[in-house]
Image (cartoon, rainbow, N blue to C red):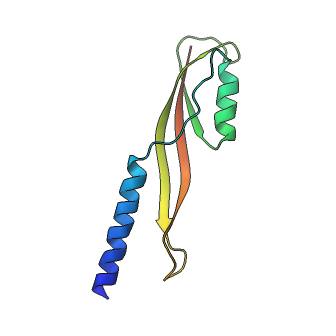
């Protein structure tokens, strides 16, 4: 029984390590578009968007300088005892720099 518990802990640790190293895929800005469209697209893809603004230009007139990945939160569990482990992304963040 102890060997099974240790194997489960090791498998969960390896899964968490692999997910921690994987960066989320982020859509890069495709040329000079307005920042609001990029933000709306990222939100539609399920990202929490944090905007870093340079200057006071309204988002409709601002351009995207960079899109950077942020923290991704996930959980790994089996749902029921004896089931296979499954990982679910619960939250993903992206930073959008606009000017």
The percent position of residue 83, horizontal first and vertical second, equals 52, 79
Relative to 50, is 14 on the left or the right?
left
The percent position of residue 85, horizontal first and vertical second, equals 48, 71
Image-quadrant location for residue 15: bottom left
Image-quadrant location for residue 4: bottom left
Image point (40%, 50%), residue name: 20
Quadrant of the image containing the N terminus: bottom left
Residue lying at the far bottom of the rendered structure: 1
Relative to 94, is 16 on the left or the right?
left
Residue lying at the far front of the rendered structure: 30
Is 32 placed above or below 37 here?
above
Is 66 placed above or below 89 here?
above
Relative to 86, is 38 on the left or the right?
right
The percent position of residue 27, horizontal first and vertical second, equals 59, 33
Image point (28%, 85%), residue name: 2
The percent position of residue 76, horizontal first and vertical second, equals 47, 64
Image point (39%, 54%), residue name: 18
Mark count: 0
Quadrant of the image containing the C terminus: top right
């Amino acid at each position: 029984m102890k060997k099974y518990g240790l194997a489960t802990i090791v498998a969960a640790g390896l899964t968490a390590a692999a997910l921690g190293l994987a960066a989320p895929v982020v859509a890069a800005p495709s040329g000079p578009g307005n920042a609001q469209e990029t933000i709306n697209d990222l939100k539609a893809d399920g990202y929490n968007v944090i905007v870093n603004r340079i200057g006071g230009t309204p988002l409709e007139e601002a351009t995207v300088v960079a899109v950077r990945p942020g923290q991704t939160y996930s959980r790994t569990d089996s749902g029921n005892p004896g089931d296979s482990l499954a990982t679910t992304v619960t939250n993903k963040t992206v930073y959008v720099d606009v000017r």
